[in-house]
Amino acid sequence: MKVRIVLVGIGGYGGQYADALMKWEGERPWEIVGVVDPLAEKAPKFKDLKALGMGFYDNLASFYAENKADLAIISSPIEFHCTQSCEALSHGTSVLCEKPISAVVQQAYAMQEARDKSNGAFLAIGYQWSYSPQMQALKADILSGKFGAPRRMKTLALWPRNDAYYGRNNWAGCLKSASGEWILDSPVNNATAHYLHNMLYVIGPAVDRSATPASVQAELYRANPITNYDTGLLRVMTTDGVEILFYTTHAVPRFRGPEFVFEFDDATVRYMVKPSRFWAETKSGEVIEYGSPEQSVHRKLHAAIRGAQGDASAIVCGVEAALPHCLCMNGAQESVDDIVDFPANWTYKKGVPGNQVRVMAGLAELVEAGYDAWKLPGEVKPQAWTVVGKPVDLSNYRKFPSR
């Protein structure tokens, strides 16, 4: 069976899916039957896709008016993930939707309902590490009880982002779109979303499930002239009592991470990005090397194609696995009353014009101090401007904003 694929969004990350398909080695168990993107002509892959002879459409309704698909690969902006996924599912088309699942939890639940009504279609979410054999091997060892119960976890990602990053589209760093739709773009919900999801995912109770968050507490700041935050520092408590700490910011002058430490009763798991590897050290002295999950960025695409051919086991990251991240992200937004602007006299621009990063002086060191201490930075080294938010109960959290 050849899987009929419709590509929804071919600019940005969608171009990587198009590129992976066109560079496919060996027999192709798929065919691209359409592209949905009102700005397709501006995409780098437009001419290559046009040469294949399929139709181009401004929206999914136009595509379905004259075509069918087995799999929709959705790489559109966050605000469209819910409506486009639900529309594809309503036509019986399975979906691989890029991360995050949606901007707000009520959309994620709507997507879950659409999946359940679709008569067998799946909804996969593109957190690529979840599909890697390295992460699956680690999760298998955790599920087997090899490391004992998880106790606490932390991940650090200092990722500078320049003016061009925030100027690349009309939604980067935005709370809402021009039409009033929630976007909630932030490092927690976009650039480094994978790494919060990973912590929830690896300790989930099944291959296709993540841990359930019970509460979230956050510090949210910004240096850039945006409506949402560029610095997110979170403490998540799961229903099993595991503490998860996440430190991410774009307002720093240097890269560090991602790196993580996961502590279990009988082992500690670590990841370093240079060289990319993660490994476990057990209390008995055994060292287990898992390799680099970065080697497997297109496995989610291969898994979705196998899923569309009938292999349900290929879909290891669907709604149930991705929704806990959305819960944490939404709860974090409500942990603070307002996003804190870094003091203007402490921020500066680094780099040459056109490639400048807005930096908060001393922020990298402050975040690293929190990471080292297993605390929120505002707890370990309070400053005049730090605000540690209140814990938000996620046990019955079904709608953002909840109040």
Image: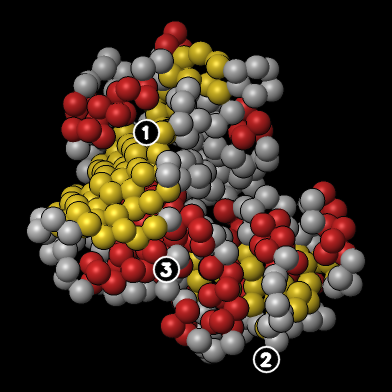
Horizontal side of residue 190 vs 337, given as left or right: right
Return the residue at label 1: 220
Q: Are marks 3 and 1 in contact (CB under 8 Å)?
A: no
Q: Residue at x 76, y 74 (%)?
A: 32
Q: Quadrant of residue 88?
A: bottom right
Q: Residues within 10 Å of mark 2 (few under 14, many from 20)?
A: few
Q: Residues within 10 Å of mark 3 (few under 14, many from 20)?
A: some
Instruction: Give the answer, above or below, for where 320 lies relative to 349.
Output: below
Amino acid type shown at disc 2? Met
Q: Going from the N terminus, do you reach mark 2 or mark 3 first? A: 2
Q: Residue at x 79, y 81 (%)?
A: 67
Judged by depth in the image, the label closer to the viewer, 1 or 2, is 2
Q: Nearer the viewer, residue 227 or 223?
A: 223
How far, Cα to Cα, is label 1 from label 2?
Answer: 48 Å
**Residue 147, position in %: x, y?**
16, 63
Amino acid type shown at disc 1? Leu
Q: Secondary structure at mark 3?
A: helix
Q: Going from the N terminus, do you reach mark 3 or mark 1 first? A: 3
Q: Secondary structure at mark 1?
A: strand
Q: Quadrant of the N terminus?
A: bottom right
Q: Nearer the viewer, residue 71 or 261?
A: 261
Horizontal side of residue 247 vs 266, given as left or right: right
Q: Residue at x 59, y 28 (%)?
A: 162
Return the residue at label 3: 133
Q: Secondary structure at mark 2?
A: loop
How far, Cα to Cα, is label 3 from label 1?
Answer: 34 Å
Judged by depth in the image, the label closer to the viewer, 3 or 1, is 3
Q: Which colour assignment does the render follow? A: secondary structure
Amino acid type shown at disc 3? Pro
Q: Nearer the viewer, residue 157 or 104?
A: 157
Return the residue at label 2: 1
